[in-house]
Image: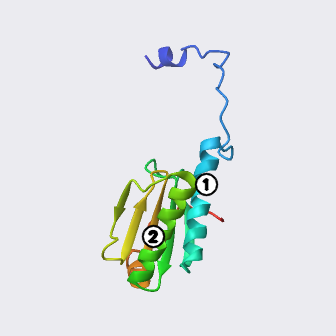
Amino acid sequence: MSEAILQTEIPAVMPPVPPVVALTEKTAEDQLIFEQVKTAVAAAEDKKALDIAVLGLAALTEFTDYFVICTGANQRQTQAIADEISLRLKKTYKLRSQHTEGYNVGEWILLDFGAFVVHVFVEESRHFYDLERLWRDAERVTV
């Protein structure tokens, strides 16, 4: 019986392999999303956000392409940062957050824009939740 297995035919010609799109190629939509991320970062910088980080998550997850993570000195500043990001994206791209969490408390404000999520923390909360460690396999993106 093992001789029959050894005598099976192997096709001489392999079927053609479809071309693979390079991961570095960006579509117009990808470029627009990255421009929106840069706008969010600029808005956070204008409100004096600290330690701004952008993580590229497209290769790791399907729910979003980027995390923008930043820190405010206190709850009032985190709210001001979140407000400025929301206002700038609304004015520039007519883009509104699909969901907002934590705004009233201000310890960790999450703004979900679909293709990217903005996290605005006070320092203690940022260290406690440590999203950069949790998503350590994500690409650090320079903006």
- From the viewer's perspective, is residue 23 above or below residue 128? above
Where is residue 55 drawn, in percent x and y?
55, 63
Neighbourhood count class around disc 2 (C-alpha, 10 Å): few under 14, some 14–19, many 20 upward = many
Q: Which residue is mark 1?
A: 34
- From the viewer's perspective, is residue 86 above or below residue 125? above
Question: Which is nearer the eye, 142 or 32?
Answer: 32
Where is residue 142 drawn, in percent x and y?
66, 65
- Find residue 51 and report its image quarter: bottom right
Residue drawn at 36 percent across, 77 percent down: 106
Residue drawn at 36 percent across, 78 percent down: 107
Give me the disc on residue 82. Answer: 2
Question: Which is nearer the eye, 135 or 31?
Answer: 31
| Amino acid under disc 1 | Phe
Where is residue 72 drawn, in percent x and y?
47, 81
Is residue 131 visible in this depiction of the protein?
no
Locate the N terminus and report the quarter of the image it occupies.
top left
Question: Which is nearer the eye, 31 or 39?
Answer: 39
| Amino acid under disc 2 | Ala
